[in-house]
Image: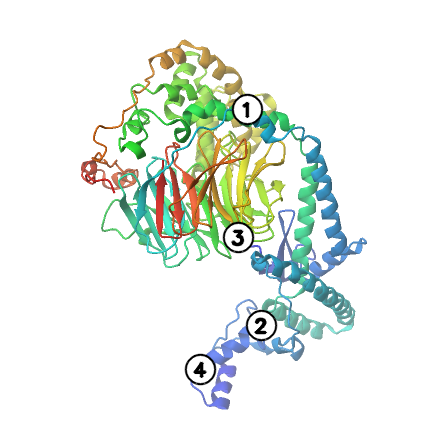
Amino acid sequence: GRDIIDWLIQKYNVSEEESLHVGGMLVKYGYIYPLKEPRSLVLRPDESPYRFQTPYFWTSTRWPASELDYGNAKNQTEGVRGYSVLHKRINHTWDFVVMQAREQLRASKQRRKADRIVLECQEQAYWLINRPPVRSLLLLCSTVMNQIETSRRALGRNRVKSSICLEGFVKYSEQYLNHDPIMQGCLPSNPWISDDTAHWTMNADMVPTPTRLRVERWSFSFMELLEDSMGRREFMTYLEKEFSAENLCFWQACEDVRHGESSRIVEKVEDIYKNFLAPGAARWVNIDSKTMDKTLEGIRHPHRFVMDDAQMHIYFLMKKDSYPRYLKSDLYKNMLAKAIVPQETKKSVFPFMRRQRHSSPSPAQAATQAEDGQAKGAGQAGTNSAVQLSA
Amino acid sequence: MCDQTFVAATFGPCECCTKPSPLINIYIKTEPINYCSFCVEVMACQGLQKGETLASLKRETETLKKKLEEERGKLNDVELHQVAEKAEAVGALSIKTKRVLKGHGNKVLCMDWCKDKRRMVSSSQDGKVIVWDAFTLNKEHGLSLPCTWVMACAYAPSGTAVACGGLDNKCSVVPLSLDKNENLAAKKKSVAMHTNYVSGCTFTNSDMQLLTSSGDGTCALWDVESGQLLQSFHGHTADVLSLDLAPSETGNTFVSGGSDKKANVWDMRSGQNIQSFESHESDINCVKYYPSGDAFASASDDSTCRFYDLRADREVAVYQKDSIIFGASTVDFSMSGRLLFAGYNDYTINVWDVLKGNRLSILFGHENRISRVRLSPDGTALCSASWDNTLRIWA
């Protein structure tokens, strides 16, 4: 490397800096290549050995490569035209390249070992710098082959009759009609229209008494019940009475593994094993032996999805057994009976005076509080709002 | 790094002949294959030698596609509008602008609601990301990204962070701090790295994983903590423009739509493309699941929106009108799934009856094309983001 730089300085009467730059370009474009670290295309001003590349592999002698740029496919017509042009060009180049490769293979077998090593070095260096046109053809091939694979898989799918599926959509819309504020309005009023946040306050996570619509939704599907934190709590209370609360605890722990930090997966899976799966565990869950065996095997090399099968088994167990019984239980029926049906707020008498729009504590507070340990910004509520006249 | 348009060159032992040499990495059936240049040629030669040429491979895809259409048609015993005849008609809708959020200095490209039903994050062409309390019109946080065209933004489920990305080919997660003096951009953490622009992003059920779609033709699932690529999704043959997570019980799938006119449904665990729909006539700009998770809608440059049934595995409705000639850029469903809100490039939002297929209403107000419409988490309001630098809340 040092020799190259010195030679450049002498020959072209330039500074060291410029010589380094020009030399670096020569290496980058493959006219000279490093022997020791072929990947590192830099010119080192030291004793590192370099070799000249044969003119065959020079960038300047290459035929212009046809690059297929899939990113440009946004322009539809250009893409279609481009494909047929590419097809023609590649077919010609393809034959040529294959012929060359065969020729080279035959020739290389006849060379002496020393020559062969040199040739290998040259070729390595060449491929490192130049992307061969043949890769575009291969990309095309692999894409088409993948499409074939997907289509074949799709043909094997189980499909449901249209009449059944479409019925499902009509039923769903009917069931949720009263829960769609834009279609049916909401009680006591839509906060965006009346500027009154009562609707949100009444439906907050922690309320002593939930609204009737909310409790009704728990009966629509098991997922609705679990997704509502209050619903989940109620269900847990019910399961405790039935001595099967470990199922829900297990399910929650599995969710935590699936969606939590990668770094804590091993530790969480160990906890689950200790608490729920080990023989004689405190909160042992009843999983069928096949799933249990598979899960225990997987736990030896824990990963994010290792609990999936067991989790699904318990989920469907709860859904088919405990959930329907919960909906028929006194616990649920009482909840439904005492649930609030808010009074609809009549439009205010003076329509021109808009209510004060109160702000709410930002969820981002949780993060800051954790850092400082004090309740910052609690006084924010109510300070940021302003009375506005209708625009 | 997640990448498809380039066949990355790495160095190492070839998986076929074991010689150490520069390797070419390509994906066959979602499996990565790392061969040296010579073995790659040999493999392609062999693949094509079985009497196949690229042309014959293409012909095989066409035949398979036709067969697929036939199979799908067999179970098609009734049309959606026929079944919908017995459904009650939708009453007159009165949807008006209730808030106008001004503050962005350039086109607003994306927005996302917070789970608290009133906050939202929005991003624009000038690199600004703003977190608003849309109810009070307060701007609570603002940050400037070094790149322009922030095309994707998402609110974390916990409400303590936002993700944003765009032309910088990255998607970063920014924790939100209430300290007014804090420079949010300083805490920005790069999570996703693509080889082309990031078109869409969403958190999965927690703050710990991020799903992104990119102009490089792939989607990817990332671990936020470590920035590690957990799974990549290959199959689109052009830019992926949009994605949406399924609200299903098992929570393992998502749908993506792209410039190749295809909408693909993916399994997040295996990275496999489980279903594919190709009936649009132009780029699919947006995809969104039906609330039950059994179907999804798409918006396309061909000025139509379409409704796809996942269990029947086919398109069941097309929402179009002769008077609508501009492309649709975004869609979202109302809470019950009965209404479909679609934003168009002619500055309007059309409200469609999902079941009966007719247009119920047009919302005027924006002064440039609509880039995004999103219903609030409790369905009380619709937010629309537009190239006229504003966001509007409709209720």
Instruction: For mark 2, name the chain.
Output: A
Q: Is residue B208 visible?
A: no
Distance Cα–Cα, label 2 vs label 1: 59 Å
Give the number of the disc on residue B2: 3
Question: Which three-letter amino acid code belongs to the residue tagged 1?
Answer: His
Residue identifier under label 4: A18
Residue B202 falls left or right of residue A312: left
Distance Cα–Cα, label 1 vs label 3: 34 Å
Residue nearest the observer in this picture, A353 or A362: A353
Give the number of the disc on residue A35: 2
Give the number of the disc on residue B156: none
**Marks 4 and 1 on same chain:** yes
In this view, B109 is above or below A390: below
In this view, B81 is above or below A245: below
Question: Which three-letter amino acid code belongs to the residue tagged 2?
Answer: Leu
Residue identifier under label 1: A313
Distance Cα–Cα, label 3 vs label 4: 36 Å
Q: In the rendered structure, are the residues bearing label 4 and label 1 in contact, judged by CB atoms less than 8 Å apart?
A: no
Q: In the rendered structure, are the residues bearing label 3 and label 4 in contact, judged by CB atoms less than 8 Å apart?
A: no
The secondary structure type at the circle numbered 4 is helix
Instruction: For mark 3, name the chain.
Output: B
Residue B224: image quadrant is: top left
**Marks 1 and 3 on same chain:** no
Distance Cα–Cα, label 2 vs label 4: 23 Å
The secondary structure type at the circle numbered 1 is helix
Give the mark, 2 or 4, whose residue is nearer the N terminus.
4
Instruction: Pick out the residue farthest to the top.
Output: A330
Nearer to us of marks 1 and 3 is 3
**Marks 2 and 1 on same chain:** yes
